[in-house]
Amino acid sequence: MEFVDIEKLKASEDFVGNIRWDVTPKVFMDPKTASGETVDVSYGYMFYVDLVKDRPHLIIMQLKHPLSKTVAYVQGVPEDLLRECMLCTPSECISGMYPISEKLEKWLKKGLGLS
């Protein structure tokens, strides 16, 4: 698995332009909304947090049809932000994937030059 830092991600216009802030692990696993619409999870990149060797890591998943895949681990993320993500409700934490928190999203957007 490739390890990347925020500066490498920031340099990729394709990556930054295709981040799916609207796709969480819950949406990824069940893309139907409460109103019955379906979220298209066949393109872009999703961030999520997962435990790897008992430590939380920020993971990037490339969303593709028919098979999405994990493409990188992001280095240099403050561990307290990662651990906070793991405090989500059971309905939001799906298949060992934890959604990013609002604080982590702000940290990412700042580091990627989006805010």
Image: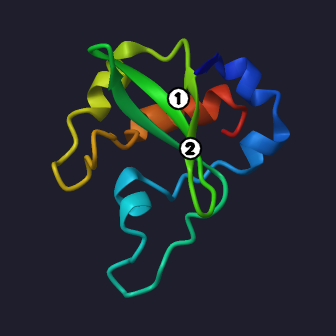
Residue that label 2 marks: 69
- Quadrant of residue 41 in the image? bottom right
Which residue appears at 37% of the width and 60% of the height? 29
Labels 2 & 1 near each other (Cβ < 8 A):
no
Assign a secondary structure to mark 2. strand
Quadrant where the N terminus is found in the figure: top right
Colouring method of the image: rainbow
Of badges 2 and 1, the one in the foreground is 2
Q: Compare marks 2 and 1 and give the one earlier in the sequence.
A: 2
Q: In the rendered view, does 22 fall on the left or right side of 43?
A: left
Under mark 1, the amino acid is Trp
Q: Is residue 10 placed above or below 115 in the rendered structure?
A: above
Name the residue type under label 2. Lys
Q: Most extreme residue toward the bottom, as rendered?
A: 36
Q: Identify residue for label 1.
A: 107
Q: CA distance from mark 2 to mark 1?
A: 24 Å
Query: On residue 98, which mark appears?
Result: none
Horizontal and vertical percent for residue 92? Answer: 26, 52
Q: Quadrant of the C terminus?
A: top right
From the viewer's side, name the closer residue of 112 and 68: 68
Which residue sits furthest front?
66
Q: Which residue is at 54% across, 52% downward?
A: 21
Residue 38, given in percent of the width and then of the height, sits at 48, 79
Give the camera-side residue of 115 and 12: 12
58 w.r.t. 23: above or below: above
Q: Position of residue 11 (x, y in %)?
A: 82, 27
Write down the quadrant of residue 61 in the picture.
top right
Q: Quadrant of residue 88?
A: top left
Closer to us: 1 or 113: 1
Secondary structure type for disc 1:
helix
Residue at image point 51% right, 73% down: 39
Q: Give the left or right position of residue 50, taking residue 65 as reference.
A: left
